[in-house]
Image (cartoon, grey):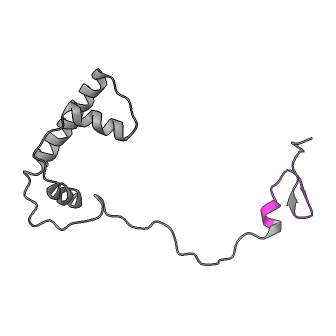
Amino acid sequence: MSFLIKTIEVCKVSQTVSKQDVLHIATLARLKFDDEQAERFTNDLNNILGYIEKLNELNTDNIEPTSHALDVFTVTREDKAAPSLSNEDAVRNAPKSENGMFRVPKVIE
């Protein structure tokens, strides 16, 4: 969270987006908006910028920057070889087996 706040601080927002800006960005992105859509996106972007300005009011002087909003840790185990099922144990409960392999009905003619 503090990383986000620090990033937002760097991106000081002191302007608004005009409908012309939205249409210019749409052109660069090869998107087509009608007037209603352009107006709606202009309002949405200006609302987002308003929220960012509100976040800039927070005092983040004593907050350490982080790369994620939440603590991130790896949940995978160490990749170590360990004993596993024997072939006999693996097919023990199979409805049908043959030569240590699962026997299944033919599905492709």
Residue 106 colored in magenta in the image: no
Quadrant position of residue 20: top left
Q: Nearer the viewer, residue 107 or 40?
A: 40
Left or right: where does residue 101 sit relative to residue 47? right
Identified at 9% across, 46% down, the residue is 14
Q: Nearer the viewer, residue 92 or 73?
A: 73
Question: Residue 47 location, x and y as percent?
Answer: 18, 36
Residue 91 colored in magenta in the image: yes
Identified at 28% across, 58% down, the residue is 69
Q: Nearer the viewer, residue 31 or 60?
A: 31
Q: Nearer the viewer, residue 30 or 64?
A: 30
Above or below, 87 relative to 109: below
Quadrant position of residue 6: bottom left
Identified at 39% across, 34% down, the residue is 31
Q: Quadrant location of the N terminus?
A: bottom left
Q: Quadrant location of the C terminus?
A: top right
Identified at 10% across, 52% down, the residue is 56
The region drawn magenta spans: 89-100
